[in-house]
Image: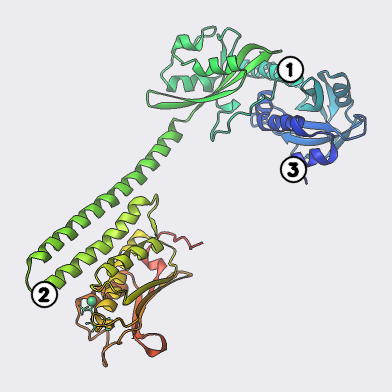
């Protein structure tokens, strides 16, 4: 079934501004439906048929009452035999009320049909379809709701509702059921629904008396003034006594004269408190990552200072390695301190790790090239940190051991980091085209600290596997790391896009 604008263009003579007016009506008319406890339909005459048949462009069901129409009626055609009031409203441009049978059935309904006017001419008809009255006397709330409904419906027939500018769609904007205050032309309160009174209590206003202006009981009237003077709806949030209330003011007009207002209130205190808590939790986590990073950088700097003061080359190397290990962890915390979530884009981290290792290559002659291929996607922080340390060790080993002659002459050395993301696992290879492992080398027999750290992290902490062998075409060395995502983190991991 076609959506409202297409349907209107296809079947009716509506277009341009008049069509936009009806679209605005179909955005704001929930208010009318709720105030009248009734289903509303919006109908426009079918093109070139002289107002004998109408097509239903839109339908709204009340949230304050029961619907008569559980089926979608949009696109349905109604003729003047079925609904004479419709054609009369259209031709005579007047509001008609009477009995009719329900659309598509025999049951009786109370029908009100209202011409929708725009710039002095009829462009559509709005109908209110209500159950026939039971003879029960309506309560106070119901009476005020219906009175405001009548006034708004007159505005529809006058062309002053919907308003020229649509209300800003705010999440959680107050509805009729949230709380209603009716103001007269002088701003005095005529009625406040029980929910509205509760909302006033939340912001510390306990002195509700009818006839009194909102300003007199301590409620900021600025929004009401703006709405009434500008003849446009206004929505505003009032915060007081740690409570937040959303205020939506709809000016009521008599012709073009301001004649009171409908004020809808919604207590959003709990909603806002939750927003604030979520926000501050994220901000706190980011701040902690930031501080951890700063502390790690301080430690790294202290090790560097110490390294400058020792004479033994082994001690220097050991301190430099420790410094790099700490910096590789700091990189992950820095990245996490910039993220709103506990996930990091590992692509960003690997780039910084490569830079860290490149800085340690003493020759500046470009004899050694680094390359990153593929993508690991987003990883949870607790997985990214050990993986960063592992890759730092493996890249550093390539630099330290694969090209023993790089200082003497450029050898066209290359180190590649290959990242792959599969379902439930991350695969990383660090491949070089250097001299290869010494014959008889095995991971188990290896005594170095670097590979011990790598093994402990990969097989222990991350629950993965580590293999080593010759590189591409049997040249150099290839370390292969596989990490399962499920065991590494219970958190759901986002697949790379
Ligand atoms: N890419 C590589 N190419 C050649 N040999 C390597 C490579 N990676 C590691 N090795 C060998 O493995 C040994 C152990 O490495 P590691 O545990 O990091 O200790 P260290 O780097 O301190 O020697 C190295 O001394 C080296 O012989
Ligand atoms: Mg090493």
Spot occupied by residue 12 in the image (x, y as percentages of width and height): 84, 36
Q: Alpha carbon of mark 1 to alpha carbon of mark 2: how far?
A: 92 Å
Spot occupied by residue 467 in the image (x, y as percentages of width and height): 34, 82
User: Which residue does the numbered mark 1 point to in the structure image?
Assistant: 154
User: Which residue does the numbered mark 2 point to in the structure image?
Assistant: 313
User: Dividing the picture into quarters, in which one does residue 54 lie?
Assistant: top right
- Element under label 1? helix
Spot occupied by residue 260 in the image (x, y as percentages of width and height): 61, 12
Q: Tell me which numbered mark, 3 or 2, is placed earlier along the sequence.
A: 3
Vertical arrangement, residue 292 with respect to residue 439, above or below: above
Spot occupied by residue 93 in the image (x, y as percentages of width and height): 84, 19
User: Dividing the picture into quarters, in which one does residue 263 lie?
Assistant: top right
Q: Alpha carbon of mark 3 to alpha carbon of mark 2: how far?
A: 77 Å
Q: Quadrant of ligand 2?
A: bottom left
Q: Which mark is drawn over residue 3? A: 3
Q: Alpha carbon of mark 1 to alpha carbon of mark 3: how far?
A: 27 Å
Q: Residue furthest bottom?
A: 439
Q: Residues within 10 Å of mark 2 (few under 14, many from 20)?
A: few
Which residue is pictured at 18% across the width and 68% down the height?
A: 320
Ligand 1 contact, mark 2 (Cβ < 8 Å): no
* Tag 3 and tag 2, C-beta contact below 8 Å: no
Vertical arrangement, residue 425 with respect to residue 14, above or below: below
Is residue 156 toward the left or the right of residue 365 in the image? right
The residue nearer to you, when weighing 183 against 139, is 183
Q: Is residue 479 visible?
A: no
């Amino acid at each position: 079934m076609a959506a409202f604008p297409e349907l209107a263009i296809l079947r009716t003579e509506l277009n341009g501004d008049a069509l936009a007016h009806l679209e605005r009506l179909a955005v704001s008319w929930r208010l009318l439906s709720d105030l009248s406890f009734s289903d509303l339909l919006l109908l426009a005459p079918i093109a070139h048929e002289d107002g004998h048949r109408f097509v239903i462009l839109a339908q709204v069901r009340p949230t304050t009452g029961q619907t008569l129409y559980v089926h979608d009626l949009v696109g349905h055609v109604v003729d003047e035999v079925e609904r004479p009031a419709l054609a009369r409203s259209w031709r005579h441009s007047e509001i008609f009320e009477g009995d009719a049978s329900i659309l598509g059935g025999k049951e009786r309904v109370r029908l009100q049909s209202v011409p929708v006017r725009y710039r002095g001419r009829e462009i559509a008809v709005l109908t209110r379809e209500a159950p026939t009255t039971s003879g029960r006397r309506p309560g106070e709330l119901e009476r005020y709701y219906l009175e405001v409904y009548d006034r708004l419906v007159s505005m529809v027939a006058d062309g002053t509702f919907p308003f020229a500018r649509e209300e800003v769609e705010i999440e959680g904007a107050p509805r009729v059921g949230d709380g209603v205050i009716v103001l007269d032309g002088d701003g005095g309160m005529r009625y406040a629904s029980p929910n509205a009174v509760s909302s006033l209590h939340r912001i510390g206003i306990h002195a509700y008396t009818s006839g009194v202006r909102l300003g007199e009981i301590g409620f900021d009237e600025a929004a009401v003034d703006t709405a009434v003077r500008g003849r446009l709806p206004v929505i505003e949030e009032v915060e007081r006594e740690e409570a937040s209330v959303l205020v939506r003011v709809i000016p009521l007009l008599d012709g073009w004269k301001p004649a009171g207002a409908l004020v809808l209130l919604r207590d959003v205190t709990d909603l806002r408190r939750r927003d604030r808590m979520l926000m501050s939790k994220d901000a706190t986590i980011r701040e902690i990552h930031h501080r951890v990073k700063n502390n790690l950088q301080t430690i790294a700097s202290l090790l560097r200072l110490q390294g400058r003061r020792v004479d033994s080359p082994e001690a220097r190397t050991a301190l430099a390695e420790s410094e790099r290990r700490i910096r590789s962890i700091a990189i992950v915390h820095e990245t996490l301190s910039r993220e709103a979530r506990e996930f990091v884009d590992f692509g960003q981290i690997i780039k910084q790790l490569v830079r860290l290792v490149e800085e340690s290559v003493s020759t500046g002659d470009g004899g050694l090239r680094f390359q990153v291929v593929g993508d690991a996607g987003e990883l949870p922080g607790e997985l990214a940190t050990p993986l960063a340390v592992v890759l730092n060790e493996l890249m550093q080993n390539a630099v330290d051991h694969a090209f023993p002659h790089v200082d003497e002459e450029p050898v066209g050395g290359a180190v590649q980091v290959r990242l792959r993301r599969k379902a439930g696992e991350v695969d990383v290879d660090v491949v070089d085209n250097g001299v290869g492992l010494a014959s008889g080398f095995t991971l188990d027999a290896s005594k170095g600290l670097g590979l011990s750290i790598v093994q402990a992290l990969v097989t222990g902490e991350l629950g993965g596997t580590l293999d080593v062998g010759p590189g591409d075409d049997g040249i150099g060395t290839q370390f292969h790391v596989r990490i399962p995502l499920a065991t590494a983190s219970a958190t759901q991991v986002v697949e790379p896009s």
